[in-house]
Image: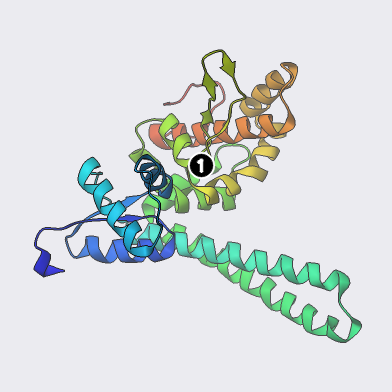
Amino acid sequence: MSRFGDCHVCMEATGSYSTELATYLADNNYHVSLMNPACIHSFGNTELARNKTDKSDAAMIARYCALHQPDPWFPAPLSERQLTALVRHLKNLEEMRQMEENRLEVAEAVIVPSLNEHIATLDELIRETKKKISQHIDDNPDLKRDSELLKSIPGVGEMLSSSLLAFAGNLRRFTSSKALVAYAGLNPQRCESGMFKGKSRLSKVGHGELRSALYMPAVVAGQYNVVVKDLTERLKLRGKSGKERVCAAMRKLLQLAYGVVKSGKTFNAEIPLAG
């Protein structure tokens, strides 16, 4: 790439593959922008493109980059990248275990011992990976400090605190709790045109893994976290559905998480935190 001189490399965020390449380029002092695929898709729609090939997509991304000059992307610190890898590995192991449990329910007797053996192996790997996650956080002072702040929030346990640190990184980098909520794709998206007013829905233009990690803790927090419980009860009185209340609880947990990390103070329901 040196023959192209001072390059601005722009690519769609496609998970671990794009992140590895972007990290390599950034480490070698290239100007890199990692874009949400939805932005590129919307830009393509404005061009009324008829063809879709790898070559035409690459040219379109180059035009987007030249026109919009997106901000540079910088890789997370190594400790955060390692935590992300561990948390994703744990999630994959748990999904594999659930798949084997599902097979066990309808399995022929001849393969039951093999399935049980595989499940036992996965259980051991899950335990080992959880220990590695805890040890990794304990070995990194910044991660440990933020983990303790996050776990002071009722409803935020070991797994959610680890997932927040893995998928959102240093929460202080966000300008506000609204920015963090938008990053997770939990901001409401309004649909209005003239006299028409449609229902608001989640934008979902954000981090799906983070939303997934928040779901069950939000359900629990709706019962045991006084701030979240008060919110969900008020929404119930207003006739909001269970799904809407859980989504609101997920947003509130993110706001509380941002507040404790930004302020550096443990959770206190009586004290308003940074927003």
Residue farthest along the bottom direction in this orientation:
110
Residue extending furthest toward the top: 195
In the image, residue 34 sits, relative to residue 222, either above or below, namely below
Task: Measuring from the top left, give residue 149's x and y in whole percent.
Answer: 48, 41
Count of labels shown?
A: 1
- The residue drawn where x is 28% and y is 56% is 59
**Viewer-closest of 229 and 88:** 88
Between 203 and 223, the residue placed more toward the observer is 203
The answer to which image quadrant residue 262 occupies is: top left
Amino acid type, residue under disc 1 in the picture? Leu
Q: From the image, which quarter does the C terminus lie in?
A: top left
Q: Residue furthest front?
A: 50
Residue matched to label 1? 150
Q: Residues within 10 Å of mark 1 (few under 14, many from 20)?
A: many
Q: Is residue 109 above or below residue 93?
A: below
The coloring applied to the image is rainbow
In the rendering, at what x and y percent does residue 86 appear?
50, 64
Q: In which quadrant will I find the N terminus? A: bottom left
Between 167 and 127, the one nearer to me in the picture = 167
Horizontal side, residue 95 vs residue 50: left or right? right
Outermost residue on the right side: it is 109
Question: Which residue appears at 66% of the width and 36% of the height?
Answer: 221
Identify the residue shown where x is 71% and y is 23%: 240
x and y, in percent, of residue 243 in the image: 70, 34
Q: Is residue 136 visible?
A: no
Q: Is residue 42 left or right of residue 266?
A: left
Left/right placement of residue 66 relative to residue 269 reads left
**Is 248 or 142 nearer to us in this picture?**
248
Query: Disc 1 on helix, strand or loop?
Result: helix
- Can you see residue 239? yes
